[in-house]
């Protein structure tokens, strides 16, 4: 699974990288070295402009943890941060979003953990690893994501704050290469040449869509142990990527 990741690029850079045509400069998502479920994250998607009806590529903050439209509670999202590639096209919670509401979630890299048994001198603990493309971050990765709209029925008016939520999930698969040595699952990505096809809501062939899903950095990944400070979701900052103490 992918339960924590890093996303620190400026929105201005994301607008250029993903050829975004619509975004609100006042929408704020701070650089985050410890993105956790229910956090707001940057997402690239194709949506209809309310004024013109034209399809535009948007950069928007979404809440990580997909909440299906039929869910009774926003809290459902904390358990739906990942969608398995093997079943995403058929599971009731994801299949409608997979058909029409796909997005890209920019990331520098992601974390996974290994259990370290106790020794005579140390307690058992979980060692975090940061997994990122070889050769540095560059333009990072674009996780393959889905998004969904959810209406809070306890809020009276559609225009009231908190009436509507837009949430997202990351598609995952069996881990390979460097990631597989740490955890059996990993996030899937979309290559730059396939951004248009993935985001196009008119493209709905499930086999063709699944064929666009690729391993991060085409499998050319670097895995290194980092500070255990990342284990606490309240910790944040570049120091989380420091090499683990020997």
Image (cartoon, rainbow, N blue to C red):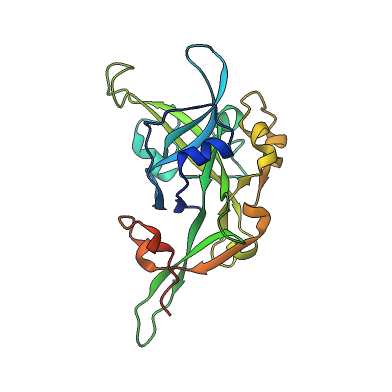
Q: Is residue 235 above or below residue 39?
A: below
Q: Residue furthest bottom?
A: 120
- Write the residue at 33% across / 17% down: 158
Asked if one can make out residue 169 in the rendered structure from this viewpoint, the answer is: yes
Which image quadrant is residue 132 in? bottom right
Numbered disc total: 0
Q: Quadrant of the C terminus?
A: bottom left
User: Of 201 and 243, which appears nearest the observer?
Assistant: 243
- Between 86 and 12, the residue placed more toward the observer is 12
Is 169 on the left-hand or right-hand side of 220? left
Residue 241 x %, y %: 44, 63
The residue shown at (66%, 27%) is 204
| Residue at 52% across, 55% down | 109
Residue 57 position in % (x across, y down): 56, 27
- In the current view of this chain or complex, which residue is farthest to the top? 52
Q: Position of residue 166 (x, y in %)?
A: 42, 30
Residue 101 at x, y percent in the picture: 55, 29
Question: Looking at the picture, does residue 110 appear above or below residue 22?
Answer: below
Q: Is residue 93 visible?
A: no
Q: Along the line of sight, which residue is nearer the eye, 210 or 35?
A: 35
């Amino acid at each position: 699974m992918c339960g924590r990741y890093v996303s620190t690029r400026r929105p201005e850079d994301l607008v250029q990288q993903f050829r975004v045509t619509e975004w609100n400069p006042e929408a704020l998502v701070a650089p985050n070295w410890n993105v956790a479920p229910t956090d707001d994250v940057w997402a690239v998607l194709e949506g209809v402009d309310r004024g013109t009806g034209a399809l535009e590529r948007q950069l928007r903050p979404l809440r990580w943890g997909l909440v299906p439209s039929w869910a009774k509670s926003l809290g459902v999202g904390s358990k739906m941060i990942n969608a398995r590639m093997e079943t995403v096209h058929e599971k009731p919670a994801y299949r409608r979003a997979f058909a029409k509401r796909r997005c890209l979630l920019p990331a520098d890299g992601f974390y996974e953990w290994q259990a370290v048994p106790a020794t005579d001198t140390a307690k058992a603990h979980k060692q975090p690893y940061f997994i990122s493309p070889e050769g540095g971050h560059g333009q990072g990765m674009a996780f393959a994501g889905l998004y969904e709209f959810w209406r809070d029925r306890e809020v009276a008016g559609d225009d009231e704050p908190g009436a509507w939520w837009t949430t997202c999930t990351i598609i995952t698969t069996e881990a390979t290469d460097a990631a597989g040595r740490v955890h059996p699952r990993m996030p899937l990505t979309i290559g730059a040449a396939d951004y248009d096809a993935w985001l196009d809501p008119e493209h709905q062939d499930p086999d063709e869509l699944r064929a666009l899903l690729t391993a991060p950095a085409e499998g050319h990944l670097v895995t290194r142990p980092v500070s255990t400070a990342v284990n606490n979701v309240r910790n944040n900052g570049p120091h989380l990527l420091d090499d683990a103490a020997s």
